[in-house]
């Protein structure tokens, strides 16, 4: 993980491991991220002024294999929402981690019918955590749950893939990235009228991920380039050989 400011960049993560899901503190003075190793996934907070870091908690087993964001910082500065699986091979749910004590409590249980809850986002008032529930490989929806717990509420009825989402700064609408129309496009969805979809002029052949600025009318986004090919594994020698390679998704 590094921070880019104009023409220079500064490395943040210096310890060996897989790092991901960086999240700013509300005051911009700290950066939280996940460090995944062989024993588990650690929730780390890095102080930008001193360069020091502290591990809030380490969740076991380690979390691998997700393209979506797995961590976010609350507007009140006191909580982190983390996507994590309690048991290896089981769907991940959401956890709340105290920034002060590191105490972790379970917030959602996706159940056996879903593949997990990912991409947590706090509502601007900090009262709710929205997330993407992976219902199947080609179907995801956005849900929301109170930070106090309870039954999640489904906020979208898209019926297709959703690769990222975020709240508008006023908390009145969601923006989601979905292939509802064939290509991946950003869609604006009013919270009180989920059936009303307004396309935003950002689209891609590949899955989009993004974040909305809280105090400016702007967003940052990426397109997840994917080029899946077909390989053959020799079980005797454990050597791989690529058989089919095109610019499309080969399966």
Image: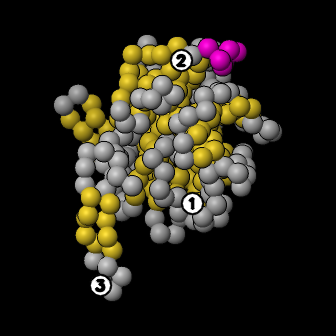
Percent position of residue 10, x then y: 27, 42
CA–CA distance in space, label 2 to label 3: 51 Å
Q: For residue 193: magenta?
A: yes
Mark 2 or 3, which is nearer the eye? Answer: 3
> Mark 2 packing: few (<14 Cα in 10 Å), some, or many (20+)?
many
Picture coordinates of residue 58 (x, y %)?
Answer: 57, 60
The correct choice, above or below, for 17 with respect to 214 in the image is below
Mark linked to residue 188: 2
Q: Which residue is mark 3?
A: 237
Tell me the crowding category of disc 3: few under 14, some 14 to 19, or many 20 or more residues within 10 angstroms, Cα based. few
Which numbered disc flags the more N-terminal residue, 2 or 3? 2
Residue positioned 26% across, 64% down in the render:
243
Quadrant of the frame with the C terminus: bottom left
User: Magenta region: which residues?
Assistant: 190-196
Q: Position of residue 111 (x, y in %)?
A: 73, 52
Tag 3's secondary structure?
loop
């Amino acid at each position: 993980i590094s921070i880019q400011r104009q023409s220079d960049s500064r490395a943040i993560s210096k310890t060996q491991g897989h790092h991901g899901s960086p999240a700013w503190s509300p005051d911009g003075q700290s950066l939280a991220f996940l460090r995944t190793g062989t024993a588990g996934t650690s929730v780390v907070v890095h102080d930008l002024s001193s360069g020091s870091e502290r591990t809030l908690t380490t969740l076991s087993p380690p979390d691998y294999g997700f393209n979506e964001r797995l961590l976010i910082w609350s507007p009140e500065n006191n909580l982190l929402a983390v996507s994590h699986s309690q048991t290896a091979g089981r769907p991940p749910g959401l956890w709340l981690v105290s920034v002060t004590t590191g105490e972790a409590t379970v917030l959602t249980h996706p159940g056996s019918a879903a593949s997990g809850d990912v991409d947590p986002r706090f509502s601007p008032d900090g009262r709710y955590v929205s997330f993407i529930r992976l219902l199947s490989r080609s179907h995801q929806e956005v849900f929301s749950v109170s930070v106090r717990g309870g039954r999640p509420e489904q906020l979208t009825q898209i019926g297709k893939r959703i690769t990222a989402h975020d709240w508008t700064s006023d908390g009145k609408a969601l923006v989601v990235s979905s292939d509802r129309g064939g290509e991946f496009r950003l869609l604006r969805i009013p919270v009180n009228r989920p059936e009303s979809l307004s396309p935003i002029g950002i689209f891609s052949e590949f899955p989009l991920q993004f974040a909305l600025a809280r105090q400016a009318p702007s967003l940052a986004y990426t397109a997840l380039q994917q080029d899946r090919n077909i390989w053959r594994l020799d079980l005797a020698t454990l050597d791989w050989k690529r058989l089919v390679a095109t610019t499309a998704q080969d399966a």
